[in-house]
Amino acid sequence: MTLRLQMLGTGGAFAKKYFNNNGLLCTEDFTLLIDCGITAPLALHQLGKPLEKIDAILVTHIHGDHVGGLEELAFRMKFVYGKKPVLYVAESLAEPLWEHTLKGGLTQEGIACLEDAFDVKLLREGEPTQLSPKLTVELIRTPHIPGKASYSLYINNEIFYSADMIFQPELLTKLVYERNCRKILHEVQLTGPGQVHTTLQELLSLPFDIQSKISLMHYGDEMESFIGATGEMSFLRQHEVYTL
Ligand SMILES: O=c1ccn([C@@H]2O[C@H](COP(=O)(O)O)[C@@H](O)[C@H]2O)c(=O)[nH]1
Ligand SMILES: [Zn+2]
Ligand SMILES: [Zn+2]
């Protein structure tokens, strides 16, 4: 089954060279935007991708580099195309996404809740959900910020998309050896302590056969100086189209 991934950006929260880590995941008849950060509207514009070609958006957690573009996207879909974007969101994130992030900007006549701005589809952790005939996504809750929900994605029961998370070697091992995971798209923090992210040093501790499945994303502006220092892992590049 052919899946294509084109990252709108591959940068970490503070990266300035690579835009926010948001991606277009495409089957032949469906385009999913994974996360819609602050830079997503500009990245889509630069790629020449009209908003109406995006069939749905899925958000992994509530940080600006993952949800900061939703206000503009909702307004443009409403006023330019007269449509509500389809928004896949974990049950646990829907209320905080509205109350803590979007309410201030989106509230106006005709918009009083998340459902007024988006066609909201709630996702349950651990339950694979078919988004289109050839695209299924399962949310896996993974640790990122203490006390805040955040989710990784298991796509078509074979591709792991970490989103932002603290290193989880047991999960990665289980996915590869027990769930036939054949590709891992993983965030990486290249310098400094990981704290709420996964460091390159941590990923380098994984066995070579797991490393060889990993493409690195959500990196800092210093990425170029780490080329050749990432073991069996390679860097995902902004705008390149990958067949998964
Ligand atoms: O050096 C750092 C930089 C950032 N953080 C924390 O990360 C998040 C924001 O980044 P995301 O990519 O959106 O997760 C925020 O909680 C910062 O406090 C950090 O811990 N260390
Ligand atoms: Zn992030
Ligand atoms: Zn985050």
Image: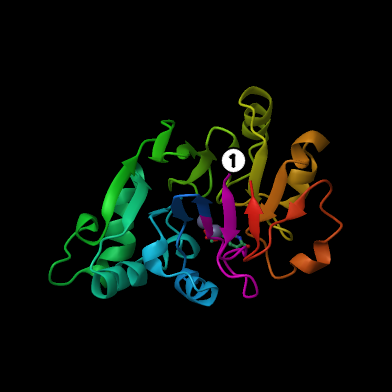
Q: Is residue 19 above or below residue 209?
A: below
Give the labeled residue for mark 1. Answer: 160
- Position of residue 43 measured from the top left corner of the image (x, y, whole percent): 52, 72
Which residue is situated farthest in the front direction here?
A: 28
Residue at the image point whose x is 44% and y is 31% from the top: 126
111 vs 241, left or right, is left
The verdict on label 1 being within 8 Å of ligand 2 is: no
- Position of residue 171 measured from the top left corner of the image (x, y, whole percent): 62, 32
Residue at the image point whose x is 52% and y is 36% from the top: 156
Magenta-drawn stretch, dominant element (helix, strand or loop): loop
Residue 50 forms part of the magenta stretch = no
- Magenta range is 1-24
Name the quarter showing ligand 2. bottom right
- Position of residue 20 measured from the top left corner of the image (x, y, whole percent): 55, 66
85 vs 198, left or right, is left
Q: Where's the N terminus, which quadrant?
A: top right
Q: Quadrant of residue 222?
A: bottom right
